[in-house]
Image (tube, coloured by chain):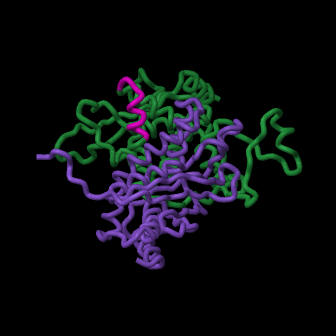
Amino acid sequence: MASSQPVKPPLAGQPAQAQRGSQAGLKYPSSGKTIYNRPLNRSRTQELSQASFAYLFGEMVSYAQKRVTGIQDLEKRLNVQGHPIGLKLLDLLLYREPTRSQTRPLNIIALLQFITTALWRHLFSRPADALEKSSNPETPDEYMISDNEPLVNQYISVPKEMNQLNCAAFVAGIVEGVCDGAGFPARVTAHSVGKGEEGELWPGKTVFLVKFQPEVVEREAYLGKS
Amino acid sequence: MSAAKAARQGEEIWKTKIDKVNAELVTLTYGTIVAQLCKDYESDYVEVNKQLDKMGYNIGLRLIEDYLAKSGTMRRCANFKETAEMIAKVGFKIFLNISPTISNWTTDSKQFSLIFDENPLADFVELPDDGRAQEELWFSNIFCGVLRGALEMVQMQVEAHFTSDVLRGQESTEMRVTLIRYIDDEMPVDDE
């Protein structure tokens, strides 16, 4: 995660020096405890405590909060931090699909279904609660993914004066990363739709608004005709 | 409490009392936190270590209550050795489902090492190949802060730092924990 550039392992017998020019290259323990020796599926079904996630996410949000000027800025920052995770999960989750369904999604619906089922199940152990297309003829490029109770917000309480804030912007960033990585560039934002009323069934309900770039919709229309 | 009993207790709590999430969600979230710090501090890894320690400290201050509630041990550890066992076999177990090995006690029983065979925070991780990260960055430094913060809340001032990390190309991942002193209950100054 920390490295932004994918780095290839040095080939056996070939000094790392030669591969990377002037750089010294990374050192690896002789015990073979490296990411290249570790099966990619090992942590697929492993679990950690939800508390550990909540602590980390809480620190992430409060750290981000110190470095921003407003709510939008804060959401943008959380989004940016989720983005690389989406890019990586797209490949990782496709790799883990059974061979027959290992293909990358080729149209918007397949992509969104992948997100609401495979991605959601992996991260939150259940599918998303709804997927809808915007019924507004003005915005055919918009889709909505609903989550009645986002796991990431479970231990986040938003102060009243910041009620516009939805920390699931982090998840929106992950979704955006998946869309971008799949070749369907989009902007994804998280919106609270719970009204804060007494006795509401899903007070934390969040809608992720996926707005695809115009070229994506154009391509889709063109492909649909043939 | 004996080591074996602590291990059983940790296992039992993990199985019955802990809400769980997918491990990779946690791993990837931690990864993106460290990556963001490296970006914000322009790869000043010494500063990144400090920030991670600070975040951990904040977590530790709150985590201790969670630990006490879940472990149900409202009893003080008899000595620092027992504290070490509880950290390794119950604390790490119920939050991260790992039990680092305790070793290298000093003769005065004030300093020990935790050896991490498994480290869920570091799955999928390779440090940047910039010639410096492997010398300067302690990727999992947040652990040090967590221990410092949590133990401070139960009247123990400790110092913790990593001495080696497989991510740096070293053979093991080891953290050194030192008890500095037991903090006496102090009366607040001038409190009426």
Whether residue A178 is visible: no
Q: Residue at x 32, y 36 (%)?
A: A192
Q: Is residue A82 left or right of residue A90?
A: left
* Rendered view: B69 above or below B161: below
What segment carries the magenta color?
A60-70
Q: Residue at x 26, y 36 (%)?
A: A159
| Viewer-nearest residue: B1 or A216 | B1
The image position of residue B112, as x and y in percent, is: 53, 64
| Viewer-nearest residue: A100 or A13 | A13
Q: Residue furthest right?
A: A13
Q: Is residue B190 left or right of residue A101?
A: left
| Viewer-nearest residue: A215 or A83 | A83
Which chain, by letter, is purple?
Answer: B
| The N terminus of chain A sits in image quarter | top right
Q: Residue at x 73, y 51 (%)?
A: A28
Was residue B188 drawn as part of the magenta stretch in this picture?
no
